[in-house]
Amino acid sequence: MKLPHVDYEAPKTVAEAVELLAEHEDEASVLAGGQSLIPLLALRLANPAVLIDINGVDELSGVSAADGWVAVGAMTREYIAEESGTVADAVPLLAAALPLIGHEAIRNRGTIGGSLAHADPAAELPAVARALDAEFVVRSPAGERVVPAAEWFEGFLTTSRRPDELLVEVRFPAAERGTGVSFQEVARRHGDFAIVGLAASLTLSGGAITDARLAFAGMSDVPVRAAAAEDLLVGESPSAGLFDEAARRATADTDPPPDLHGSAEYRKKVAAALVRRGLREAADNAGRRGD
Ligand SMILES: Cc1cc2nc3c(=O)[nH]c(=O)nc-3n(C[C@H](O)[C@H](O)[C@H](O)COP(=O)(O)OP(=O)(O)OC[C@H]3O[C@@H](n4cnc5c(N)ncnc54)[C@H](O)[C@@H]3O)c2cc1C
């Protein structure tokens, strides 16, 4: 299907992009990698009057590390982050999730900011951002605002970004020593969106779990933390029995949406299995980052 008629702007700087967004607000859509937006336009599920194409805004791309955080520019392509040594060393959970997004051709165009602004609850990166308490930096003519991940995802494909705000950067905390991670998912075919996904991170010190983070994709209209399971894990030593109980607690109060790919009950069973697998793998590789 052909795209609908739409005006097109191609700013070269963040300042120009922000000015255009402030001028058009709800009438405008930001065009990043286009891997979600262009299909939405073609299917007439989005109908903006203006496209603000930020592909020429070089200052929005790049990965840098400072003060215990890794900052990823919104226009950083998914494959660039996937190949980044900084991401692999400092944000191993992000590194584990990236290769699971679609296929190479998608990751070649798709961007970190695009995925997180799109906020598909079945996508990998929202679960990673929620698990790690990432920070979202948005800019408008009024200045910059930093939004914690817990306040970013508001509903299906909906974030707390205001219409005049551009997502410029996402910051992830660097993993501590002794941290092991795992991204688990079940999808119909390799490269499909997950039916259920799980971002898992465990930090171990002296054989005990000092930090536990679990966030699901595909279990609600937003990525969700499994707080009851995290609370159970902290202070304990990894064991099969502990991980079984964590899986039970992580899924006990969930009410996942049924769809063509699976009932709510099926999703809960898959989610529990992913918690057991994810925790096992995270505990196994925690040792590699030193104890
Ligand atoms: C066949 C296929 C399979 C896929 N499989 C997966 C998968 O398994 N997992 C997965 O997570 N994703 C998958 N995707 C989606 C892919 O990851 C997209 O790249 C991503 O969701 C959107 O990123 P984008 O850069 O292409 O953004 P775009 O499509 O350009 O934009 C997406 C939305 O975000 C907004 N936006 C983008 N950047 C900004 C910004 N800086 N500030 C404010 N708003 C912004 C846009 O206005 C739009 O509403 C798939 C896509 C395709 C086509």
Image (tube, rainbow, N blue to C red):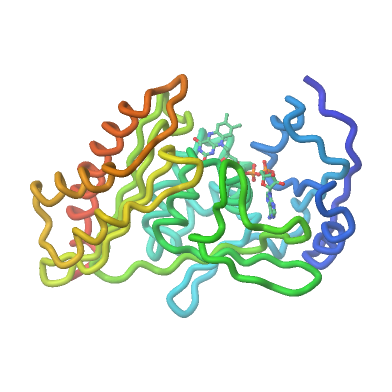
Q: Is residue 2 visible?
A: yes
Q: Is residue 109 above or below residue 229?
A: above
Q: Is residue 90 above or below residue 68?
A: above
255 or 8: nearer the eye? 255
- Quadrant housing residue 13: bottom right
Side (left or right) of 231 relative to 190: left
**Furthest-bottom residue in this view:** 67
Identify the residue shown where x is 11% and y is 72%.
206
Side (left or right) of 117 relative to 20: left
62 or 275: nearer the eye? 275
- Quadrant housing residue 33: top right
Quarter of the image containing the C terminus? bottom left
Q: Is residue 104 above or below residue 71?
A: above
Identify the residue shown where x is 76% and y is 55%.
163
Q: Is residue 63 visible?
A: no
Identify the residue shown where x is 68% and y is 61%.
60
Give the percent coordinates (x, y) of residue 200: 31, 52
Give the percent coordinates (x, y) of residue 153: 55, 53
Identify the residue shown where x is 48% and y is 52%.
83
Ligand 1 sits in quadrant: top right
89 or 177: nearer the eye? 177
Give the percent coordinates (x, y) of residue 162: 71, 58
Side (left or right) of 215 relative to 124: left
